[in-house]
Image: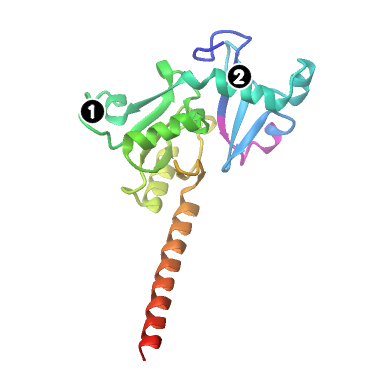
Amino acid sequence: KKGNGMDTDNTYLKIALPIHGHEEKLKGKVYRAYADLAIAYCHTTSNGRPPILTVNEVVKEGKTADSVMAQCDAATHDDFSLVPLIEAAGLGKENGRPEELVLRRANEGPYGAAGISDRAWMDKACDLLGSDVMVIPSSIHEVIIMPDTLVSVQDINTIIKAVNKEVEPEDRLSDHCYHYSKDTGEFEDGLAWQFKKAMQTRNYQSNDMLSDSRSVYLAV
């Protein structure tokens, strides 16, 4: 069944959670690692946070964890939406290409941050912003997405840690940002991406210097 994933007990729902601090809670459960996050799969409930499915529950239903995750991924694709940040904040309509987007559940329902695991939505964010993107975890309910050309990872992480002090502990997703590449589909820690980028730049510079030195040697 498609929809917002919240209206029937027979529907699956996925939630993004930090793995750190939830190790015991995730044991024997249906989830997949996504960087240092867990995309956890649940049966929807009408009261409180949905419990994460156990592998035993899935087996009793005659299914496998992989089949349940695939079914949920397909069924919940239409659950999410990308909205310019200025519009999400109620500050008017965005004119032209947005500078920042909010990825959340359609109709502003809960657990919208799980949309980061849907490559089609992440690719669409890259297309709308015109570049690969940084992902800023506001909470388990939504994330902010911006071009990776406009930000300092260290500055963003400082802001995230400050904002997290105002977020309920159970709603916190992460204390750092992430990077997403449309070409590779890779979702990773922002600092790890920044380090790799710096190393690539250093290697290119080293290769250029080596090439120049060889040219000088051959000329002599």
Q: Which mark is residue 46?
A: none
Q: CA distance from mark 1 to mark 2?
A: 35 Å
Report the amino acid beneath label 1.
Glu
Nearer-N-terminus badge (1/2): 2
Residue that carries the numbered disc 2 in the rendered image? 50
The reply to whether residue 102 is visible in this rendering is yes
At 37% across and 82% down in the image, what residue appears?
215
Q: Which mark is residue 94?
A: 1
As displayed, is residue 1 above or below residue 92?
above
As displayed, is residue 54 above or below residue 191?
above
Q: Secondary structure at mark 1?
A: loop
In this picture, which residue range is highlighted in magenta?
A: 16-25
Give how far across and how far down residue 98 sits, in percent. 27, 34
Q: Quadrant of residue 132?
A: top left
Asked if the residue under mark 2 is in contact with the one under mark 1, i.e. CB atoms within 8 Å, the reply is no
Q: Quadrant of residue 46?
A: top right
Indicate left or right for 197 with 86 as reference: right
Mark toward the viewer: 1 or 2? 1
Give how far across and how far down residue 120 sits, in percent. 46, 30
Indicate left or right for 210 with 67 as reference: left
Foreground: 59 or 43? 59
User: Is 24 part of what is drawn in magenta?
Assistant: yes
Give how far across and how far down residue 65 sits, in percent. 71, 26
Report the amino acid beneath label 2.
Pro
Residue lying furthest bottom in this view? 220
The reply to whether residue 52 is visible in this rendering is no
